[in-house]
Image (cartoon, rainbow, N blue to C red):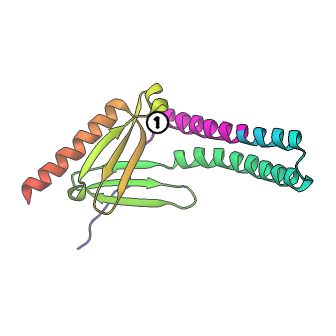
Amino acid sequence: METQVKEPRYKLPKESLRVGIIGDIIFEAIILLIFAGLFVLDFLFKWPAWIGIVLLILFIVFVLFSVIGYFTTVIDHRNWRYDIDEEYVQLRQGAWFQKDQLIPVTKIQSVETKQGPLLRKYKLRKVEMETMAGDYSIPGMPEKEAYALRDEIAAYAKAKEEDD
């Protein structure tokens, strides 16, 4: 028995990329404040020289990873896809290491939308699905589409449940 699964066709909106980058910037700003505090403490208390060298090396590594993280966020966003039909929810993410997930609608136990402060500012929501095997999410969808997708998944799951 061979089932043909089509490629996922829906992309995440550009606003979700903006939310991801802003979230990264906030996290990196907090880390930079911690580094600044450590450098000030190093200067004030005249810690041994090796501590200053280690802090400097860690700072340089942090900056390099931050730049790489920015490009990774952009590339991953461009490669994120999702789709739904009456049998499956299909998720595809990743550029270098692609991850395809095929979630049977009949196995979905709950579906909900979530929204944090950044998502709220851009009128986006995250759709989360829960199965016995794990949790899955579609980040940063426009609110109307997120509610419609949630309702569609719930309707498909209920229809399949009644058929069985």
Residue occupying the point 55% across, 55% down:
95
Q: For residue 2: magenta?
A: no
Instruction: Identify which residue, 8 or 68, lies in the foreground.
Output: 68
Residue occupying the point 61% across, 49% down:
72
**Residue 33 appears in the picture as rendered:** yes
Residue occupying the point 20% across, 45% down:
154
Instruction: Identify which residue, 87 or 139, lies in the foreground.
Output: 139
Please report the bounds of the magenta region as a residue range. 11-33
- On screen, residue 52 above or below 39: below
Question: Quarter of the image holding residue 160?
Answer: bottom left
The image shows residue 28 at horizontal and vertical percentages of: 66, 40
In the picture of the structure, the residue carrying the numbered disc 1 is 13
The image shows residue 116 at horizontal and vertical percentages of: 44, 34
Instruction: Identify which residue, 53 or 155, lies in the foreground.
Output: 53
Numbered marks: total: 1
Residue 3 located left or right of residue 158: right
The image shows residue 2 at horizontal and vertical percentages of: 26, 71
Residue occupying the point 30% across, 42% down:
112
Query: Which of the image's four quarters has the N terminus?
Result: bottom left
Q: Can you name the residue that lies furthest to the bottom here?
A: 1
* Secondary structure at numbered mark 1: loop
